[in-house]
Image: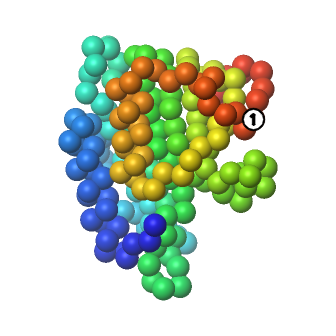
Amino acid sequence: MRLRDDDLDTYLASVADLLDRYGVELDLVGRDLGIEQTRDSARTFDLRGFLPDAGSSTRAILEIRETWLADDAGTFERAEYAYELLDSGRAFRRAFHLHAPDWFERHFMVLVHEHCERPIGTFDCQHYEGSPLRDAFAGVLALIDAWTDEPPDCDRLRCLEPGVRRPGW
């Protein structure tokens, strides 16, 4: 996915609008909704919000993070993403990640991976095989589906790193 610099602001505002349609209350304490520029000219954003109370004493947290890198044509390409759901009320974490693609390709022949913890903080597998998510809109919808459905059955996912049940990170 590629966007011009000024289109990134529109993209972010549209993602925030989608979250609002699902009742996500964005946590913007001490910061504005906007794209940040890093020292290496990358563009990043981090949206964090709370899902509507579903009868639990603890509200689920949803996070949407992306990093975009400039290319030679003056546009930006999405280089990393992390779409995360932490549902303490139902004791699970679900996440979809694209980061360190060279390392994941070299070790597991995949570019993206997923996380599934049930209960939170413990897992039988550190990384699960994932499918790429086209954009933050698909990330939001995947997390909303995980939140509105039954808690995930992590054993149904294909494990990239099997191991002994251990505390999460």
Relative horizontal placement of residue 28, taking residue 106 as reference (left or right): left
Relative horizontal placement of residue 39, taking residue 105 as reference (left or right): left
Tell which residue pokes out farthest to the bottom in this image: 73
Q: Nearer the viewer, residue 30 or 115?
A: 115
Q: Nearer the viewer, residue 147 or 26?
A: 147
Name which residue lies at 35% across and 35% down: 144
Coordinates of residue 78 in the picture (x, y in percent): 49, 64
Against 139, residue 85 (above or below) is: above
Coordinates of residue 163 in the picture (x, y in percent): 78, 26
Query: Where is residue 2, by image quadrant?
Result: bottom left
Coordinates of residue 31 in the picture (x, y in percent): 31, 51
Name which residue lies at 57% across and 29% down: 116
Relative horizontal placement of residue 100, taking residue 162 as reference (left or right): left
Quarter of the image where the C terminus is located? top right
- The three-letter amino acid code for the residue at tag 1 is Glu
Label 1 CA crowd tier, 10 Å (few <14, some 14–19, many 20+): some
